[in-house]
Image (cartoon, rainbow, N blue to C red):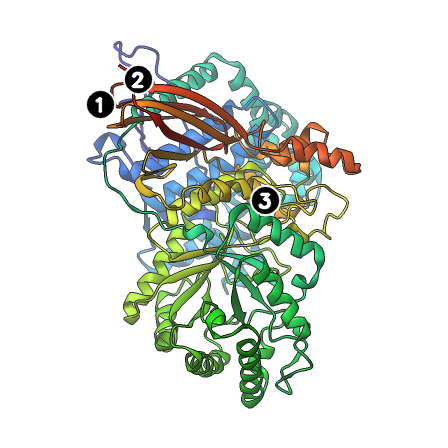
Amino acid sequence: MLPMAAGDVLVANKGDQFELRATSTCQPKPLLFLFEISDSLLYQAVDANTIIFRCCSSHRGSSDEFEGLIEAIRSVLDAMALDDQRGSFLLFSNIYALLNELVLRFADRFEAVNPGEHRAWQILRYMGAHYRERLTLNLVANRFYLDPAYLSRLIRRETGINFKAHLTQMRIECAKRFLTQSSMSIARVATECGYTNLSSFNTACNRLLGMTPSEYRAKTSITAIAKDVSAGEESHRYQQLRQREKIRDQMRETRRIDMAMTGDPLKPIWTELLNIGSVRELLHGHIKRQIAFIQGQIAFKYGRMWGLFGPEALCDLEKGEYANFGTLDEALDAVIEVGLIPWIVIGKCSDPERLYECENKAWQHALSSFLSHVLDRYGKQLIVRWRIEMVFEGDPSSPQFDIYRDRLAFTRKRIKDIDQAMLIGGAGFQQLSDEGKLSERIKSIAYLLDFVSLKVFPYSGSSEVGEQRHPMRIVETGVFIESVQRVRAAMMHAGVSVPIYVTEWSNTISTEDLINDTLFKGCFIIKTCIEAIDSVAGMGYWLASDWYSAEQRSGSLLTGGPGLITKDRIPKPALSAFGFLAELTERKLIFKSEDCLICQREGDSSILGFNYVQPEKTYYLKDESSFQPGEVLSLFKEEKKRCSFLLTHLRNGAYEIRTYSCDARYGSIFNQWATLGFAKHLRRSDIEYLKNNSNMHMELEERMITDGVCRIDRLAGANEFFLINLRYCAKTNK
């Protein structure tokens, strides 16, 4: 007998005999989760002819390897307990996530040991991959150059049944999943499983399942199961246990913070730079006004701009000359007049390859003309503070990278001729999976760089910002830090030690993703910025205004653009997030965790906290731009989180405690828009009403501290973020 405690997991392999028995001392009655994996599902998921799971957490010495599996199981149970329409699809998604966790961490694969077994395995795998097609014994035999009679004997030897019976079995296993997990019509299920007529499908179901497809669906569908479970005693008990578990975890997580500690100065990497647009965009009055508004709220240091060597700046790279500098001057003046320092990007334009296709002399002449002009117009004292970033947006393994390196060398020489203090960096690296290739490229240009620039978006592959394609999105969190660490490791391998700037980053490359307008975006920004402390020299959020993408949903109040403010200059939660972060400037870091940051300066302490809740997996299975406003809020679970802090060794006396927060009621233009039913046709007065009701919430409390201790408790809703400021006012009167 194998004893199992609460939270234990055991996998019984095919052929294992087992019995689950509760002991008389089990109080209350235990809840058990049973998950059966069909052979056909494993054939599709695992590249091996035999697989054994070695998974028994009651034998574990450490629980670390089981944490992902247990969390996956809980996700399945949570989806089953949902009492709304999300349950069916979410359960389907979470079951496959659970299978993925099992296969990745706990599976041993065994290949065929002789050629005959290997051939049989290949044939069975082929049938498993193509059983939805019109397979026949002769077709498969021809595919593997075998006699049909021999093939039939081979399949019977391996499976115990003939070719037709095995094919039917696989098709019915597939049909069972469709009937259980989808709302497809019976006829559509038959077609998807390889049947050419409904009659033969019904006959096969009756023979193997003992019932018709409709009867099987009524009995086993996930929707029905979810409803039965959610209405039952077991579901209610499970939800109660989960709630108690969360409360216990939160009680244990009260942070005790010694405010007498001397922290290090906090560098505000999040306000180091902001992507503000191309020369063409900076010529528009509404863009200028939006940049001025944002800068008045946050005070970023650098304004990252591009297109200075393209046709929008009246630059002809084929000739290597500017028609005139009027357009260029207007764009640069717009940046400088709002207090931003220009961060000039070379190589980022609508057609970046043109920069590396023009003649070398033409490029050198264009660059020299540009530098001579800005030196004459703005003076050396001003432009020495500018940053030059030369990016390469093509394939780093292409021959054009060598041209990029040569032009980077010339650009560096011309810039250093002006002043050695001027800094130049590159190359705008993205998430390259081949660290060896990345290290090689960094090493080849390391001597030319004062800093390395990097772009981070949670996508796999080499998709560029603004391209009209849909690359695979990465569901897991931590993409930002993992990307930075990968580049830093490549730099160390190449012997390079210069600062890293993440010059473009966000949670999406889409300009029509309505999640950009929600509380989630603000929470994501704060979470990412806190993670990046001590990892990078600066971060450039992508990007400033919604006007860059407003044409996509021009009739809507919110467009799903990545900007910090809407086209109507209404602050979004993203701007409030940067505002909270900016309040921590010139403070010392006392404490940092995955969900909070505590800083202080003389007589003034601040707690920045948040409750980060990711979108449900359904978000990652569709194109970001396909979601309608009414669907977006349902992507987030209503998960509350208690944030508790015990601040010790404070000075005794009177304090003012101000709490600023953005939640579903305050500080979210998206939630306010929801109260109007996401109306598209709004009057000017409607927009002003929404703007006035989308401000963050503020609370003020006066508290007397006599024992040097102050307890702060806050129950935060999903993706709520808050800033709590304690300001010392006076000593205690005795």
Q: Say whether disc 1 or disc 2 marks the residue closer to the N-terminus.
A: 1
The single residue placed furthest to the bottom in the displayed view is 361
Circle 3: residue type: Asn
Report the residue at 58% width, 73% height from top. Answer: 352
Q: From the image, tell me which residue sits under label 1.
A: 1
Q: Judge whether 451 appears above or below 222 on screen.
A: below
Circle 1: residue type: Met
Q: Nearer the viewer, mark 3 or mark 1?
A: 3
Q: Quick one: SS at disc 1?
A: loop
Q: Position of residue 469 (x, y in %)?
A: 62, 58
What is the C-alpha distance between the residues marked 1 and 2? 10 Å
Do we see residue 131 in this rendering? no
Residues at circles 3 and 1 in contact by the CB criterion of under 8 Å: no
Q: Position of residue 624 (x, y in %)?
A: 61, 47
9 or 314: nearer the viewer: 314
Q: Which mark is residue 21?
A: 2
The single residue placed furthest to the front in the displayed view is 733
Quadrant for the N terminus, please. Answer: top left
Q: From the image, tell me which residue sits under label 3.
A: 516
Q: Label 1 crowding class (10 Å Cα cut-off): few <14, some 14-19, many 20+?
A: few
Residues at circles 1 and 2 in contact by the CB criterion of under 8 Å: yes
Q: Say whether disc 3 or disc 2 marks the residue closer to the N-terminus.
A: 2
Q: Judge whether 186 appears above or below 732 on screen.
A: below
Q: Judge whether 252 appears above or below 734 on screen.
A: below
